Amino acid sequence: MGFKNRDIISIRDFSKAELLHVLDVAADIERNGTGSFSQLLKGKILASLFFEPSTRTRLSFEASMHRLGGSVIGFSEPETTSIVKGETAHDTIRIVDGYCDIMVMRHPESGSATKAAEAAKNPVINAGDGANEHPTQTFVDLYTIRKTKGSLERLSIGFLGDLKYGRTVHSLSHALSHFSPDLYFISPESLALPDRLIRELESSRIKIVEEENLSRVSRQLDILYVTRIQKERFLDEGEYAKVKGFYKLDKEFLKSAKPDLKILHPLPRVDEINPRLDSEKQSIYFEQAHNGIPVRMALLGLVLGCFE
Ligand code: CP
């Protein structure tokens, strides 16, 4: 399959077969042990450019590159770079492109990953561009769902929280449309999934339900994908105050859910999942974050042409 030298900008650029191929390569890596590939990318350099804060995405990409025997350069505090002297992101990308073999970038602006890919000769991986997309998180989410449910086909999946600005939701809901799901979008009205994304999903002829009250749909769900209401995306603090703390899951919630429900969250969380839920068998968000290693190892190896 054609992954070599490919940019990973939008989940829309991947066919169903390609999505599944990445998951299969990641599953092979996990089966063999993530320590079994320590020479694969020897001599290759990943540039890790984070213009926005991150824990999981940055550190799992960097750990994955190290696990594959490669090296990492980059920054997570752009204020320590020549950007403070007025250098543009475009020029920064062009310069770093000459220092590395592959780049992973997070930036607060929607569309910034596309611009970076245009500026760079080496492959660019989008680690989140504003409220737009987060495609590598989607690979992690699909991997986690398939691992826990055995298949991605015909599941009932609820998305809860900030569906307007939630880039993980935007990418994952599109990817799931390949697998004939029933999708439930549960949010306050002001944080509903954007109309253009609802229309796009409707064109895939899948069942879509929009709802504000989780308890009205909780019994239907195989997967509940919880998201944080993202204070940093609101232009108006008053608007954030209206929805802050809108959903708070506690153990009580499990009484109204299927016994084999699984709860995912891309993390970080604030108060939407009570830590008392963490030890329940339904809660798999920490495992989900750890799946970032085999999945991102697969993506790096595929794009650098070292996995078929
Ligand atoms: N899920 C995710 O993108 O987490 P970080 O912001 O910590 O990278």
Image (cartoon, grey):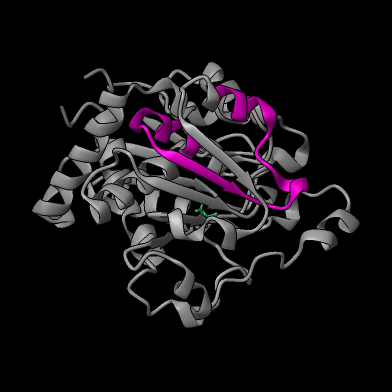
Q: Looking at the image, is 137 positioned above or below residue 197?
A: below
Locate residue 124 relative to residue 108 in the image: left or right. left
The percent coordinates of residue 174 (x first, y second) are 48, 31
Q: Which residue is pictured at 84% across the width and 63% down the height?
A: 241
Q: Is residue 301 visible?
A: yes
Locate residue 274 relative to residue 237 in the image: left or right. left
Farthest bottom residue?
A: 276
The N terminus - image quarter: top left
Q: Which residues are magenta?
A: 173-200
Query: Toward the viewer: 26 or 285?
Result: 285
Q: Which residue is pictured at 90% across the width and 58% down the height?
A: 238
The percent coordinates of residue 86 (x first, y second) are 77, 34
- Residue 196 forms part of the magenta stretch: yes
- Residue 193 forms part of the magenta stretch: yes
Q: Which residue is pictured at 62% across the width and 71% down the height?
A: 248
Residue 118: quadrant of the picture: top right
Query: Toward the viewer: 181 or 84?
Result: 181
The percent coordinates of residue 303 (x first, y second) are 30, 28
The C terminus - image quarter: top left
Q: Looking at the image, is 90 positioned above or below residue 280?
A: above
